[in-house]
Image: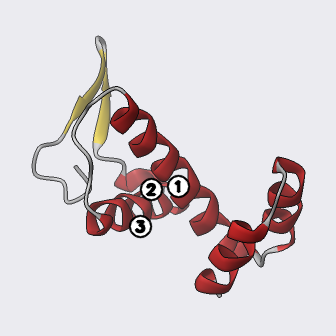
Amino acid sequence: MLEESRLRLLSMRSAREVVNHILQIKEDNKLTVISFLWIWWDVRNKMNVAEVMLATEQVVHRTRCLVTIVLDPSLNPREPTRSGLERDPDHPCI
């Protein structure tokens, strides 16, 4: 299903087409597609300002982690503190 969505998204010519397609995807895949697009966009922006490029496996890993955290916020590796968010260095999604 995800490969099919990827191929269809590649053929779309407007943001409206992309959004309409994503809204029609089954709920269980919709979150994964949206998470992947967000992670990909973030990586692309970082590459544009000469930051380190992530490997494909790292993008997939971050996408899976994001989906996991959205589905179960108790798994969020960032703990709220007075000064903001603090990362847990031992968490597998870091």
Q: Are marks 2 and 1 in contact (CB under 8 Å)?
A: yes
Q: Secondary structure at mark 2?
A: helix
> Which residue corresponds to mark 3?
64
Camera-near label (3 vs 1) is 3
Mark 2 to mark 3 CA distance (whole Å): 5 Å
* Residue occupying the point 63% across, 58% down: 34
Classify residue 79 by image quadrant: top left
Task: Indicate the quadrant containing the N terminus: top left, top right, bottom left or bottom right.
Answer: bottom right
Q: Position of residue 21 (x, y in %)?
A: 84, 67
Q: Tell me the amino acid under the disc marked 3.
A: Arg
Task: Please determine whether, in this image, residue 72 is positioned above or below residue 9.
Answer: above
In this rendering, which labeled residue sits more in front, label 2 or label 1?
2
Residue 70: image tag = 1
- Crowdedness near tag 2: few (<14), some (14–19) or many (≥20) residues, C-alpha within 10 Å: many
**87 lies above or below 32:** above
Asked if the residues shown at circle 2 and circle 3 are in contact, with their CB atoms under 8 angstroms apart, the answer is yes
Q: Looking at the image, which residue sits at the far top?
A: 83
Say which quarter of the image contains residue 35: bottom right
Q: Secondary structure at mark 3?
A: helix
Could you tell me which secondary element the residue under label 1 belongs to?
helix
Nearer the N terminus, badge 3 or badge 1? Answer: 3
Q: Residue at x 18, y 54 (%)?
A: 91
Q: CA distance from mark 2 to mark 1?
A: 6 Å
Pinpoint residue 71: horizontal percent, then vertical percent. Answer: 54, 62
- Compared across the picture, whether 6 is left or right of 8 comes to left
| Quarter occupied by residue 3 | bottom right
Left or right: 67, with 8 as reference point: left
- Looking at numbered disc 1 in the image, what kind of residue is underneath it? Val
Q: Nearer the viewer, residue 38 or 78?
A: 38
Report the residue marked by disc 2.
Answer: 66
